[in-house]
Image (tube, grey):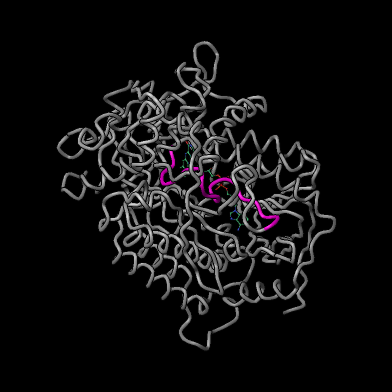
Amino acid sequence: EMTEPYTSRECDVLVVGAGGAGMRAAIAAAEAGCSTVVVTKSLLGKAHTVMAEGGIAAGLANVSSEDGWETHFADTMLGGQLMNNWRMAEIHAREVIDRVYELERWGGIFDRTGDGLIMQRAFGAHSWRRLCHVGDRTGLELIRTCQDKLVHTAGTDVYMECTLTRLLTGENGVTGAVGYDINTGQFVVIRAKAVVLATGGWGRMYRYTSNSWDCTGDGAAMAYEAGAELLDMEFVQFHPTGMVWPPGARGILVTEGVRGEGGVLRNSLGERFMKDYDPAKMELSSRDVVARSIYKEVEAGRGSPHGGAFLDIASVRSPAEIRSKLPSMCDQFESFAGVDITREPMEVGPTVHYTMGGIRVEAETCASTLPGLYAAGEVAGGLHGSNRLGGNSLGDILVFGRRAGVSAAEFAKTVARRGDISEAVIAAERELMLRPLSGEPDTGPAENPYQIHRALQEAMQDDAGIGRSDASLRRSLAAIGGLRERTPRMRVSGGRVLNPGWQTCRDVDFMLTVSEAIVRCALERRESRGAQWRFDFPEKDEELGRVNFVARRDRGEMLVERRPLERMPDNALRRLPKSRFFDVKNLPRDYAYRLAATVRMEAH
Ligand code: FAD
């Protein structure tokens, strides 16, 4: 067993993940002259990014002439309730403009204004019409364009249907990764001078999620195990509008573009209930607010028949407009629910959608705390603070994907010789991987990985979901611990070739690690802020507003530490009030005080 050969490959820069972040990183690394390998669990062009609907937020000011990167920066910071890494927010708002035009140069085709400019639509908590879009299929266009560019960039190689499961490290940092080929079950070792993790987010440990099957948190868990730090893990975004009916479709996203195009939310009494929660922004309030509002309406007995709210675009827009602006939504409701959204309202409710937390990285370079390891896209933390604004992720993956690729290439060039890889670590990973196929366990009954996954989903959805308390989080932590103890006994039938049961065993390990980080950080944040809603601490806590929580591994245990937030300098602070939705109540008192002292506040 120990001597089984593995496929071995070498490159300068290894990019794990072929979503927008991974592809953009690989293009940048290869253009910098590095041999670059991209690995993806699915087929090229099928990463989670492909599902993105609403658009890319960028202050082009094509439709709202008052817009610009400063306002975009301000909206992002206020949306994240100033828990964001402000340097990331500034870099993102500035550079996303170039990235959108670059995408256009590479052949991306956006919807147009009458003058032929890139069209921009309204979106939740963005001050102006800012989202560049292609109907409600923006992610598809982004993926198609990046894919076309990638395969035409010299020096890149793509390995599809390959799952990496452990980072290899040496004296000087990361040296590669080990994993398996999904089609053959053979082990694969890739040696590299630098690694970019672009493995996306993690929704699959929740019962209701808009995320695709491969969002199991592999990258975050692998980085954690290798010694990198995880930031802001408590902030899990519930998108307010997922489908709630029929059961098989529950969780599937209903794009915010519906509300961006004028769609209104009503309760069972026909009331536009957002007037009670955020009369200024109404349906276009930030996601955390809208999701909680729907939750509260349902709790108060004013929910729709299947436990959600009604989203109505039919009485606002003509059928032709709806069909041209929201074609995927028309298809989705027609085929899954038999609902014609040009005539009837949709039934919607909160669904786990995005993970603000992730690998802690440096803003400019995307470097993690482990030398040679970079992270970009949803797997990285910091940009979005406690709540991400819709449309800010497609920009994130392009801006920081590119930066991660550039930095990884720079780092790789400083490495004279590829670091050694440890055969012992490879053997240990192989043993872990093969255990589920190794016959009956002698320590107790065999466990089914799908049942453990399901039990984890119950524990996370019910006790670490949209609303949390100390008691519920402790229940969830205990459940995770209990499930963790059962994982060594996971067993599956069949072999290693195309065996999803076998693959799920390792996914379950990753999901347990990431879930533990979510719960431990949520326990420490004894306040409600952004996506974190604590029933037992319903208010913000000024002191906690000045710290991030970081989870890291210490002698085999998960440790959660407070890290002071980096303060924004005055010139960055001054940009904040330009937000149309500026609300002094959202700020910790000292920020508000300084703002009031330095600028004249004006509401547009
Ligand atoms: P992903 O696109 O998730 O790609 C991850 C890649 O890593 C995949 O190729 C995967 O196979 C690979 N991978 C994972 N683990 C491994 C492993 N162990 N080994 C090898 N490969 C691995 N954002 C917006 O800004 N605007 C929108 O309109 C919008 N709409 C959305 C609609 C939906 C339905 C959803 C679910 C999300 C939406 N988002 C939107 C969010 C946005 O799409 C994602 O945050 C973003 O695409 C993440 O990109 P990424 O490159 O970081 O990762």
Quarter in which the C terminus is drawn: top left
Residue name at image x 25 percent, y 38 percent: 310
Foreground of the two, 354 or 261: 354
Percent from the top left, x then y, of residue 500? 55, 63
Give coordinates of residue 8: x percent, y percent: 78, 62
Q: Nearer the viewer, residue 29 or 72?
A: 72
Residue shown at 46%/78% (left/top)?
A: 485
- Residue 527 on the magenta span: no
Q: Is residue 44 left or right of residue 216?
A: right
- Residue stretch in magenta: 371-389
Q: Residue furthest right?
A: 416
Q: Residue furthest bottom?
A: 442
Please state if 186 lies on the left or on the right of 518 as rendered: right
* Residue 463 image offset from top left, x and y in percent: 32, 62
Viewer-side residue, 555 vs 139: 555
Q: Quick one: 189 or 469, which is closer to the camera?
A: 469
